[in-house]
Image (spheres, rainbow, N blue to C red):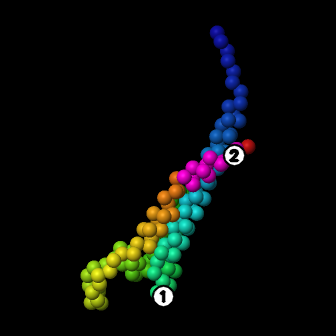
Amino acid sequence: MLDVEFDGFEEVEEQIEEYTEKAVEETKEEVDKTTKSVQNKAKDNAPEETGTLVRGYQHELSADGFSGVVFNPVEYAKRIEFGFVGTDELGRTYTQKGQFPLSRAFREETKDFGKRLKERIEDIETT
């Protein structure tokens, strides 16, 4: 009977754990950075008549840090984003095209997310 013994698996397991922890942290950092970039770009894209709309852009990260959201609670933010055709509750009639400040920001700032994340993870070193 052949008796084979392997050593070093504990060290490999520790390296895999360390790499995984670092990859998780890099992912969360890139999500945070990208979410903030989307928020800032939306502010840059938004019309700045009074500054209220620009100041309204906010971001939040999920509890686990793997996703983020940018939003604007200002009452007329949806109208600026998507446009509005019709009469509002005050009786004013609009034919307003959307300006899409947040949609454009999202497209611009997330298009290379996968590439940036891949580079961050490839740069991980373990001890």
The image shows residue 43, relative to residue 19, as above or below, that is below
Name the residue nearer the viewer: 35 or 3.
35
The image shows residue 123, relative to residue 16, as above or below, that is below
In the picture provided, is 52 more to the left or to the right than 119?
left
Residue 122 position, x and y percent, is 62, 47
Magenta stretch in the rendered image: 115-126
Residue 63 appears in the rendering: no
Please name the residue shown 33% across and 77% down the image: 97
SS for dot 1? loop
Please name the residue shown 39% across and 78% down the image: 80
Magenta-colored segment: predominant secondary structure: helix
Q: Is residue 125 magenta?
A: yes
Asked if marks 2 and 1 touch (Cβ < 8 Å), the reply is no
**Identity of the residue furthest to the top in this view:** 1
Name the residue nearer the viewer: 2 or 48.
48
Name the residue nearer the viewer: 82 or 59.
82
Judging by the rendered image, the residue that carries numbered circle 2 is 125
Residue type indicated by callout 2: Glu
Residue 110 position, x and y percent, is 50, 60
Q: Quadrant of residue 36?
A: bottom right
Residue type indicated by callout 1: Thr
Image disc number at residue 50: 1
Residue 60 position, x and y percent, is 52, 67
Image disc number at residue 66: none
